[in-house]
Image (cartoon, rainbow, N blue to C red):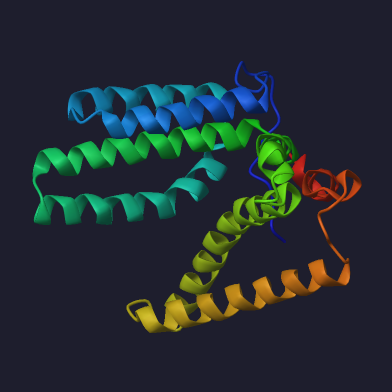
Amino acid sequence: MIGSLYIGGDSLLHRQPAWRKLLVLFAAGIVLFVVQAPEILAGAAVAAAAILATVRPPLRALRRQLTGVAIILAAIFAANAVFADWGTAFAMLFRLSTLVLLALAVTMTTRTSDMLEVVERVLQPLERTGLVNAARVSLAVSLAIRFVPEIFARYREIRDAQAARGLAGNPVALIVPLVVRTLKSAEEIAAAIDARGFEGAHPSGSASGRTGRQGGTAS
């Protein structure tokens, strides 16, 4: 089952409205990609880690979320060190680390349903022009938010199973089952949405309402 990253609590970040946290996260992303100095970006990464620490996430959950990301960041760092220079590599590492930590702090302190409600409200003006369907976009965002941790969980499950079979060094034995399972789940979810006749044209059928009832408030 695809689950929520939300962790209940009473920290300062928990008490902030979803729109404010998402706005700050968006602004931070812009600023981080404007700043180029590794020293400043390193300080930002430390600050982001301190912010995440105030949420007091369970260490097991934190390790589960950051393990896969750390591998990706290490690969990006190595690529930049080889094809660019050390300054660029460290700047990119600190920049992405800051964004990941801030995003994790936001998702751990914000219910999925609250985030989707913000998305729908932001898209309402565009919906009036006929350019987008706010409820459909909100549903797509909901599925993306929930599918990422599920893919990581399946990756770990397949990796452990293949290691037990002596196939730990075979990338094909890992990637193929992961892709097949992911596509199968996507097909099942699409069939479930079609079976429910989702149209996204009425507020009562909005994605945020359904998501909230289906577990967006899980702690």
Q: Position of residue 54 (x, y in %)?
A: 53, 21
The x and y percentages for residue 161 are: 51, 76
**Residue 171 vs residue 208: left or right?**
left
* Residue name at image x 71 percent, y 53 percent: 139
Whether residue 109 is visible:
yes
Is 150 in front, or is 206? 206
Position above or below: 207 against 179: above
Question: Given the current orientation, which residue lies at the most extreme right position?
Answer: 204
| Left or right position of 215 against 205 | left
| Residue at x-position 87% and y-position 72% | 195
Quadrant in the rendering for residue 38: top left
| Quadrant of the snapshot with the C terminus | top right
Q: Residue at x 31, y 50 (%)?
A: 73
Q: Residue lying farthest front?
A: 129
Please tell me which residue lies in front, 100 or 142.
142
- Count the marks: 0
Q: Relative to residue 129, is residue 33 drawn left or right?
A: left
Task: Note whether 192 is above or below 204 in the view shown.
Answer: below
Quadrant (top left/top right/bottom left/bottom right) for the N terminus: bottom right
Query: Which residue is most to the top?
Result: 12
Q: In the rendered image, is residue 167 in sight?
A: no
How far from the left and from the top, in percent, is residue 212?
Answer: 81, 43
Give the camera-side residue of 88 and 128.
Answer: 128
Residue under the point 25% across and 28% down: 35
Q: Name the side, left or right, on which 209 lies relative to 1.
A: right
Residue 77's place in the image compared with 168, above or below, is above
Q: Quadrant of residue 50?
A: top left
x, y percent for residue 169: 32, 78
> Residue 148 falls in which quadrant of the image?
bottom right
